[in-house]
Image (cartoon, rainbow, N blue to C red):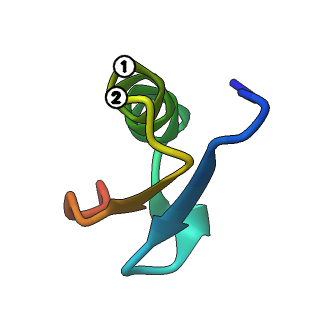
Amino acid sequence: MQIPGVHIETLHNPVRYTYGQIEKACAIAQMLNRGKLVLVEPPQR
């Protein structure tokens, strides 16, 4: 999900995050009206 003006950063290698985790982070960033959100949820193995 690409949302204009939303930038997601990850603490771990972003390739290890699922599409669902990234999508959820984008939705939360948009809901909070944030341009940037750091994803700290542990990646699925």
Q: Quarter of the image holding residue 37?
A: bottom left
Farthest left residue in view: 41
Residue 33 versus residue 9: which sits nearer the camera? 33
Q: Is residue 37 above or below residue 9?
A: above
Residue type at tag 1: Met
Binning the other alpha carbons within 10 Å of mark 2 as few (below 14), some (14 to 19) or many (20 upward) gives: few
Residue type at tag 2: Ile
Q: Which residue is mark 1?
A: 31
Label 2 element class: helix
Q: Could you tell me if the residues under marks 1 and 2 are in contact, i.e. CB atoms within 8 Å?
A: yes
Identified at 69% across, 24% down, the residue is 1
Residue 23 x/y as whole percent: 51, 28
Binning the other alpha carbons within 10 Å of mark 1 as few (below 14), some (14 to 19) or many (20 upward) gives: few
Identified at 21% across, 64% down, the residue is 42
Residue 41 x/y as whole percent: 20, 58
Label 1 element class: helix
Residue 44 versus residue 22: which sits nearer the camera? 22
Q: Is residue 11 above or below residue 23?
A: below
Residue 45 x/y as whole percent: 31, 61
Q: Is residue 12 above or below residue 41?
A: below
Left or right, 38 with reference to 5: left
Q: Which residue is mark 2?
A: 28
